[in-house]
Amino acid sequence: MTNQLLLIDSTPAWRLDRATRAQGLEGVRQARAVLRAVDARRATEATESESAGVTAEAA
């Protein structure tokens, strides 16, 4: 029995083809677009709620 750990080769023996890579990158692009839209909507809602709070206090 050996007391040494076996090292795993860090370079994969496989490669993604161009179509698979393009599909994955498109999915990442879509996910980022959704996250940006959510952030923008939250910012708009926060601004609107702050404006409504100021209006309510003035009344």
Image (cartoon, rainbow, N blue to C red):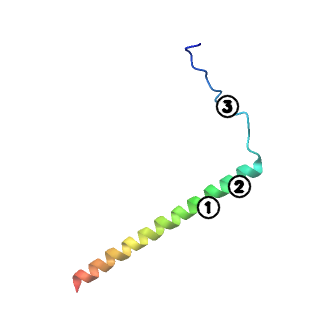
Q: Residue 9, labelled with which disc?
A: none
Q: Which residue lies under the disc numbered 1?
A: 30
Query: x%, y% of residue 57?
Result: 23, 81
Which one is in front, 42 or 20? 20
Q: Which residue lies under the disc numbered 2?
A: 23
Give me the residue at 57% from left, 20% from top.
5
| Among the two numbered marks 2 and 3 on one chain, the one whose residue lies closer to the N terminus | 3
* Separation of residues labelled 2 and 3 (CA atoms): 23 Å
| Dot 1 alpha-carbon crowd within 10 angstroms: few under 14, some 14 to 19, many 20 or more | few
Whether the residues at callouts 2 and 3 have beta carbons within 8 Å, the answer is no
Query: Label 2 sits on what residue type?
Result: Gln
Query: x%, y% of residue 19?
Result: 76, 52
Q: Quadrant of the N terminus?
A: top right
Q: How many marks?
A: 3
**39 versus 45 height, above or below:** above
Left or right: where 19 falls relative to 11:
right
Q: Which residue lies under the disc numbered 3?
A: 11
Q: Kindly state the secondary structure of the residue where label 1 is placed.
A: helix
**59 versus 15 height, above or below:** below
Give me the residue at 71% from left, 49% from top.
21
